[in-house]
Image (spheres, rainbow, N blue to C red):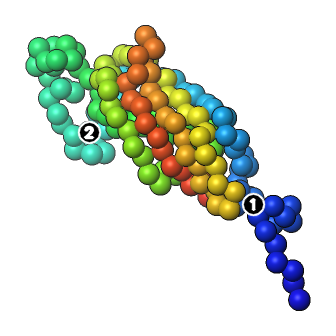
Amino acid sequence: RPRRRDMNDTNIRSGWSGTRFGKPKVGANAERRRVTRARDIIAFTEMTGDRNPLHYDEGLASRSIFGRLIVQGGVTSGLLNALVAEDLPGPGTVFLAVEWKFVKAVGVGEEIVARAEVLEVRHDKPICTLATTILNAAGETCLSGTATTYTVELE
């Protein structure tokens, strides 16, 4: 008769087995940076249909609270998609849930930095909770919040 194993038994296969980068540690972090471009707005519009004048009408945007053309929020948060799928937790990772606040608009031609830090890691399933932020070149927070991710076995 097989013996019952508990979660401390080293013979139990972790929910992270077979993931490309393995189980991340709490406190692990990563960052990605890029400069936004006018073509990001166009590409996002082609995907979503978002034709908000704040993204296209320079005159109107300059008279708005933002004082310039801004990129769509999805362009800003999209850098976090790349970060979790490529860097931390890594290939095969998708979002299960996000809770983000967009606190400062991002303009065209502005450098942004996406950062993620692992807050929690489940042992039984390849699920993480991450602190996520997007900062501009001045170090101001543009987006902040948390994300829960799932990493698919790729090996």
Measure the alpha-carbon separation of dots 2 and 1. 41 Å
Q: Position of residue 124 (x, y in %)?
A: 68, 62
Name the quadrant containing residue 116. Answer: top right
Q: Amino acid at mark 1?
A: Ser
Say left or right for 121 vs 149: right
Q: Residue furthest bottom?
A: 1
Q: Quadrant of the N terminus?
A: bottom right
> Which residue occupies the foreground of this view, 34 or 132?
132
Q: Tell me: residue 94, above or below residue 100.
A: below
Q: Amino acid at mark 2?
A: Thr
Residue indicated by mark 2: 45
Q: Which mark is residue 54?
A: none
Q: Position of residue 56 (x, y in %)?
A: 19, 26
Mark 1 Cα within 10 Å, few/some/many (few <14, many 20+)?
A: some
Callout 1 secondary element:
loop
Name the quadrant containing residue 142. Answer: top left
Residue at 36%, 16% (x, y): give it.
Answer: 109
Residue at 53%, 29% (x, y): give it.
Answer: 115
Q: Position of residue 155 (x, y in %)?
A: 73, 58
Closer to the camera: disc 2 or disc 1?
1
Say left or right for 111 vs 130: left
Residue at 16%, 17% (x, y): give it.
Answer: 65
> Which residue occupies the foreground of this view, 67 or 116?
116
Residue indicated by mark 1: 14
> Which residue occupies the foreground of this view, 32 or 135?
135
Say left or right for 95 vs 17: left
Count of labels shown? Answer: 2
Q: Residue furthest top?
A: 138
